[in-house]
Amino acid sequence: MHSKQTALVLLSGGLDSSVLLHHVHQSNNYDSIQALGYNYGQRHLRELDCAQAQVDMLPHGRLKIVDISFMGGLLAEGTSLVSEGAEVPDLDSLSEDDLSQPPTYVPNRNMMLLSIAAAYAEAEGIRDIYYGAQAHDEYGYWDCTEEFLTRINAVLSLNRKDAITVHAPFVGMKKNELVSRGVELGVNFARTWSCYRGGENPCETCPTCVERSNAFRDAGESDPLLKV
Amino acid sequence: MHSKQTALVLLSGGLDSSVLLHHVHQSNNYDSIQALGYNYGQRHLRELDCAQAQVDMLPHGRLKIVDISFMGGLLAEGTSLVSEGAEVPDLDSLSEDDLSQPPTYVPNRNMMLLSIAAAYAEAEGIRDIYYGAQAHDEYGYWDCTEEFLTRINAVLSLNRKDAITVHAPFVGMKKNELVSRGVELGVNFARTWSCYRGGENPCETCPTCVERSNAFRDAGESDPLLKV
């Protein structure tokens, strides 16, 4: 870690990466924080609005949005996360087999996002990248594990001039622990967005809505996004 | 390698990847070949025209072009390969230090391209990816080495359902050996494009023009692209 430089934080505007942003800021290891958001043809842009809102709460934060909407045409049949894909299913309609790689899984998503982040970091002279992988995701996504991260860093360490390191400080934590950490940091959860569907309010039935709701419950907190 | 399936070949329309395309076709290990070309805001699209021409020479070839022009805005200051960047320098104007990571180097380029290719392969049910890294590139690019490839495959092997393998059969060969292999395969070199500049004819002074010219000379062949 390079003290007092810039950190690059992958920021979707969801719960995990928003907590991560403030976690890195609070660590006080960096002069400034650069957030990187991806517009990949999501069903809605509310996530990116939330990302901007989170960055605006930092004294020296900037958000760069990368348009990677090519992923829509590339992967439309393989995922329901982009607008052209299939409908987002309810969590309780999924079988065990689906859950080993759920329909919201985007093929090789994290390797693409981290590769792009590393390219941007290298071009900007940034050495440290943070991303919000956490333990719960291991159930559904092979590309959220600690081993995945280790191997990504093994690739990046080959760079002769500007070796970049990806840090995932939450990789051993559960989502409810992230909620607790967020509360500790004073994160404004009303300005985070997790629902895969694009409605006015969270649908409360899609996989991430259910996961988020369970995380708040297990942390003994209430989600300000939900009507009481 | 999965016999009689589809192979995905990364095809720029340059010399190396064009030879690779026909090399994979001639191996007879696949029913069909899918080529993947990248439009990343190159200074000219002649490369992609050549890629299409090469694919058209195969009985069962298809070319998919992915628009990754986001790289222009992401990396404009870091490279001269995209239109917004600096001028392409002549090879003989470069210092030793430049050559360890030349100005035509695109930050983390191959990791991005291979990540995207792997995502596409996974979505299409393709297990084998071919890319045209070869030994000469080791002098300039950390992301063309055998070790790089090994580590990329170490990442991809973690995929629980659809592990994909990247093959680089030319990684131990020199560019002049690729010319010889291309002659053997009957590759139409007049329909390959290497020059980084966008003129009517190759400039004959940019780094890849010089490398190409040396490769043809060392192979004892003449380049049909050059006027005699």
Image: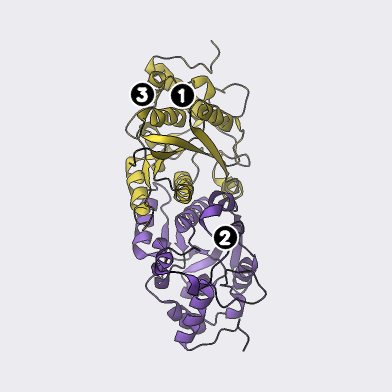
Chain colours: A yellow, B purple
Image position, residue A145 (x, y; %) = 35, 40
The answer to whether residue A56 is left or right of residue B136 is right
Asked if residue A79 can be seen in this view, the reply is yes
User: In this figure, which residue is indicated by the disc labeled 2?
Assistant: B86
Q: In this image, B166 relative to A77: left or right?
A: left
How far apart marks 1 and 3 lie (CA) works out to 12 Å
Residue A92 visible in the snapshot = no
Count of all numbered marks drawn on residues in the image: 3
Q: Nearer the viewer, residue B76 or A210?
A: B76
In this picture, residue B168 sits left or right of residue B222: left
Give the vertical position of B155 relative to B188 (above or below).
Answer: above
Q: Which residue is mark 1?
A: A212
Q: Nearer the viewer, residue B205 or A165?
A: B205
Of badges 1 and 3, the one in the foreground is 3
Chain letter for mark 2, please.
B
Residue at horizontal 54%, vertical 66%? B11
- Identify the element where label 1 is drawn: helix
- Mark 2 or 3, which is nearer the eye? 2
Q: Is residue A89 above or below residue B216?
A: above
The residue labelled by disc 3 is A177
Say which quadrant the N terminus of chain A sits in: top left
Percent x, y for residue B162? 43, 51
As shown in the figure, which amino acid type bears the numbered disc 3?
Answer: Glu
Residue A187, given in percent of the width and then of the height, sits at 45, 21
Q: Which chain is indicated by disc 1?
A: A
| Amino acid at dot 1 | Arg
Q: Quadrant location of residue A144?
A: top left
